[in-house]
Image: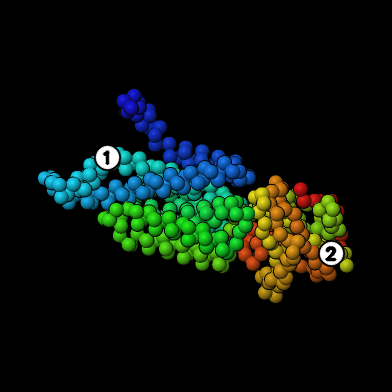
Amino acid sequence: MDFFNKLREKSAIQKAEKFFPAIAFLGGFSWDSMTIGSKVYGSDLIFLSFYYILAFISIYFIATRKSLDSFDNSIDEELDVKNINAFFNKAFSNEWPQKWIDRLTWLVQFCFGNLYSALVICYFKSSGSIAAFVIVLILAVLLVGNEFLKEKYENFGICLAFFCLLGTMLFNFLIPHLVHGMGTFWFFLSTLFSVGICYLLWIKSLKGVSHNKRFLIAPIAISLVLSIAYLVNWIAPVPLVLKQQIVCKNFDRESYSCDADKLDFWQKIGFKGLTIHKDEGDEIFFMSSVYAPAELKAPIEYRWYYKEPSKNRFMLTDKITSSRMVIRGGRDMGYRSYSKKKNIPAGTYRVETAYKDGAVIGATSFKVVDGEPKNGFVRDSLR
């Protein structure tokens, strides 16, 4: 320890330490982007669970230590047999000086940062609506803010609030991998599980500063807000991830291939919307592939919107689903499905691929145009 203390006293090391949080932040986020962002493995789930458990232990010791300090101030210097328990409390409290609290708050910050980083990526990959992106944006803001909240984590109430938020979002992501299913029941189980653990933290902390009932207000409020957000489909349908979307005609079910308009330069770089040209009587197909973990089953639906010229906004025209539109996870490039429309009038459309009666997984807009495309067709397929 003396070697490390002397090393930290050097001016070069002290200057470098200022950049450690930023380096750790960028390194962790980059690693999560390269691993969790592409595909979730069992090891990823183990690491996320480890960070959550380590945060739980750290917060517990912060809570009990602060309450012991409060109790410690009431202990007289003269101790007798009657207050022998106070003596042991005092001795235990002295084992946790401020430098250890600093280390515990650093652990909380470290674990929260890793959880935020993973959740931002996972929820972003599954977000298919503006509302879901807003939730991801909030997580991203908290991810950045976490780098400046180390000292705040000495406050048990602040720790408990963020711990509840992270717990609910984490369990909502983890449980589908474990039970091979998703839906309203599992989300509310995630919420209750997270709140229950926060309550356990609160009830296990010794009576004192950290045992104030007001510390439960934030976790309960956060749980209610997340529950409402889920019911109005603002929470991304993790762990489902949209892989590919195609609008086309002349669909071949065996190869999942079809004829799509050949993209021009501006369409390739995203500055111009997609089109599909058709002749009278042609059927227009919309295909998508959605990734899900192995053995997970989840029903999906396609929502077709038509942009009313008079109102200049999209109006829902059809919800298309069937018994065959049930995702069966495990395929790396995603479960493939499609919907079709016949005798569709020319105009602007948007189709959403969504969890049945739930949040949007992904969406795309396109124009249906009569006649032949200028650049011709190209045979495309879902990989």
Q: Secondary structure at mark 2?
A: strand
Of 54 and 156, nearer the camera is 54
Compared with residue 329, is residue 10 higher up or lower down, i.e. above or below?
above
Q: Residue furthest right?
A: 280
Residue 266 position, x and y percent, is 73, 52
Is residue 211 visible in the rendered image? The answer is: yes
Going 56% across and 43% down the picture, which residue do you hit? 44
Image quadrant in which the N terminus is located? top left
Q: Residue 283 bears which disc, if any?
A: 2
Q: Earlier in the sequence, mark 1 or mark 2?
A: 1
Residue type at tag 2? Glu
Quarter of the image where one finds residue 222: bottom left
Residue 155 position, x and y percent, is 33, 52
Residue 328 position, x and y percent, is 70, 54
Is residue 109 visible in the rendered image? The answer is: no
> On the image, numbered disc 1 is attached to which residue?
95
Residue type at tag 1? Glu
Quarter of the image where one finds residue 34: top right
Q: Residue furthest top?
A: 3
Going 65% across and 54% down the picture, which residue do you hit? 296
Going 22% across and 42% down the picture, which residue do you hit? 91
Colour setting: rainbow
Q: Residue furthest left?
A: 78
Residue 254 position, x and y percent, is 84, 53
Q: Residue furthest bottom?
A: 310
